[in-house]
Image (cartoon, helix red, strand yellow):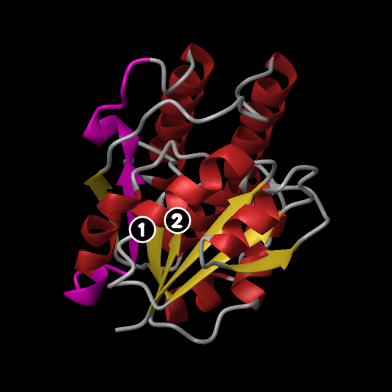
Amino acid sequence: MQIAVIIPALNEEQAIGQVLAELPRDLVSDVIVVDNGSTDGTAAAAAAAGARVVPEPRRGYGSACLRGIAELREPDVVVFLDGDHSDYPEDLPSLVEPIVEDQADLVIGSRALGGPEAGSLTPQQVFGNRFACFLFALIYRRRFTDLGPFRAVRYSSLLELGMADPDFGWTVEMQIKAVKRGLRVLEVPVRYRPRIGRSKISGTLRGAVLAGHKIVSTILRHAWR
């Protein structure tokens, strides 16, 4: 089974080499690092570590993910992973196993179930995630514990979803569309640690507010549709 990994990255020069070194490369056939307009040496560090690097100058997590999808070579499974070393790449087998065993189409890595390390999530992240999951369950009648970025999805299912969000609403958009289309969605515990460097989103009050607003508005907009 062919497994591709997409890693959006913005100014992750210090972290990206470690992320790539910890990937179980014996399981992964293709690694794409999407450089989302970095002003440091992220692209060079990723290329030196053996990744296929593609640029996406339009800022936004979703924009980077969409560019990575456009570069895929028709794998069986696609894994999305952050480039800041907060996720544990070694947990990738746990994510893809339910898909390989044909038990799921989308697998969410739940930081809540895995027990995040102290300091890895800010209070506003914890509150926002819990509130978004509560709202999701209230509207869509499906309970999740996390909207975490570390996830695996069957390639054919990913194409079916028609992902479009260019920024903070990407993860919740995927879960909403998967539930509405009746895909088999599972959560598995994953570990989570403090990232290397400062977060571009949760590290600032403005970023946290914008991300929270976008996630909630995405949940409500799709409910209206």
User: In the rendered image, which residue does mark 1 sit on?
Assistant: 23
Left or right, 59 with respect to 174, comes to: right
- Quadrant assignment for the N terminus: bottom left
Residue at 45%, 77% (x, y): give it: 155
**Residue 224 position within the rendered picture, expressed as x and y whole percent measured from the top left:** 63, 48
**Residue 158 position within the rendered picture, expressed as x and y whole percent measured from the top left:** 49, 72
Residue at 61%, 28% (x, y): give it: 199
- Quadrant assignment for the C terminus: bottom right
**Residue 58 position within the rendered picture, expressed as x and y whole percent measured from the top left:** 82, 54
Instruction: Bin the neighbour count of mark 1 within 10 Å (Cα to Cα): few under 14, some 14-19, many 20 and up.
Output: some
Residue toward you, 114 or 162 = 114
* Residue 30 visible in image: yes
The kind of secondary structure element at disc 1 is loop
Residue 184, magenta (yes or no) = no
User: In the rendered image, which residue does mark 2 sit on?
Assistant: 20
Residue toward you, 113 or 51 = 51
Does the residue at mark 2 contact the one at mark 1 (Cβ under 8 Å)?
yes
Instruction: Give the amino acid at mark 2.
Output: Leu
Against 35, is 161 above or below?
below
Residue 114, magenta (yes or no) = yes
- Stretch of the chain drawn in magenta: 99-118
Instruction: Give the amino acid at mark 1.
Output: Leu
Left or right, 184 with respect to 94, comes to: right
